[in-house]
Amino acid sequence: MPFDISQFREENKDYYGDKSLNDVAFDIYFNNESIRDKYGSYDDFAKSNGFDKSIEFENKYNSAPSRGFLSDIAASVLRVPARTAEAISNAVSGVARIASYPFSDYGDNPVSRIADASSDWWSRAADAIPQSKESLSSPVRNAFTSGVESAGSSLAISAFTGGLANAKFLSLSSLLSAAPAYGLSEFDRTVVDAKESGVSSRDVFTAAAVSGISETGTEILSDIISARLGGFGGTYSLRGLNSIQKDGTSSLLRMPASEAARIFSGIFGVS
């Protein structure tokens, strides 16, 4: 059974006082020879018992700023460009990995390495605008701010892929064109996570492919629901796509504010 370090700290509060979970974990590890012999490194001790995430969250919470609700929304909007670039970088890496998977472990190649480095950079750029203590401690507030970030990123990627597909902005076909990008991004993340965890290249490909396909399907379903909630989906038959294309709004800048808010609310609700 995994070791509950939060409960252990609470049960020994007289000894540990207000020490962080990380300090408590270090104390347990470095003062217990049997634990050091069993797990080897401190990181393996933390990961094997599942409290590495608890420590990570506490560190994140302690360093987070305090903000008002509107400031949280503004911070989410500011993270959108970096999250969008991160997802696109992951998708590019996913394409490169699939192309070279038969020839190299984990599909590694120069393009995937450059794209992954780009993804890491954009991820750090987004994290430079941290969540607030209030957002981290409130599931409802966190869901709302994350929804703004996710919906904004979805719109941005749809605009990019829709442009490549010559689809009208905010038409259903524009949104659907982004689904493969999300699937490829998920494929790449699964492979990278497995590589870092020491899972063999042969074992991870099928799982990563299933994960990517599932993400693509989920994104397609959410786009259809978003279109219905946003009121711009029309019919969803192949024949109906043509009329959706013609009715799609060509520019968000020329769209009435009430119409833009209605469409965004549908995408946000699903995100």
Image (cartoon, rainbow, N blue to C red):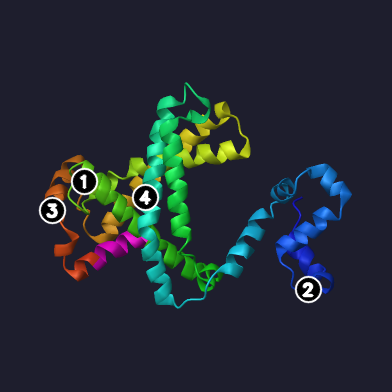
Residue 115 position by quadrant: top left
The residue indicated by pointer 2 is: 17
Q: Which of marks 1 and 4 is in front?
A: 4
Q: What stretch is highlighted in magenta?
A: 261-271
The percent coordinates of residue 132 (x first, y second) are 50, 70
- How many other residues sit within 10 Å of disc 4, few (<14), some (14-19) or many (≥20)? many
Q: Earlier in the sequence, mark 1 or mark 4?
A: 4
Residue 247 numbered tag: 3
Task: Identify which amino acid the numbered label 2 is placed on.
Answer: Gly
- How many other residues sit within 10 Å of disc 3, few (<14), some (14-19) or many (≥20)? some
Between the residue at mark 3 and the residue at mark 2, the CA separation in whole angstroms equals 63 Å
Determine the residue positioned at 76% across, 58% down.
25
Front-lying residue, 185 or 60: 60
- How many other residues sit within 10 Å of disc 2, few (<14), some (14-19) or many (≥20)? few
The residue indicated by pointer 4 is: 85
Task: Identify which amino acid the numbered label 4 is placed on.
Answer: Ala
Residue 198 numbered tag: none
Q: In this view, does 75 lie to the left or right of 257?
A: right
Q: Which residue lies furthest to the bottom in this view?
A: 68
Provide the secondary structure element on which disc 1 rests. Answer: helix
The residue indicated by pointer 1 is: 163
Q: How many marks?
A: 4
Provide the secondary structure element on which disc 2 rests. Answer: loop
Determine the residue positioned at 45% across, 78% down.
68
Regarding residue 271, the answer to whether it shows in the image is no
Task: Identify which amino acid the numbered label 3 is placed on.
Answer: Asp
Between the residue at mark 1 and the residue at mark 3, the CA separation in whole angstroms equals 16 Å
Q: Which of marks 3 and 4 is in front?
A: 4
Q: Which of marks 1 and 2 is nearer the N terminus?
A: 2
The percent coordinates of residue 176 (x first, y second) are 28, 45
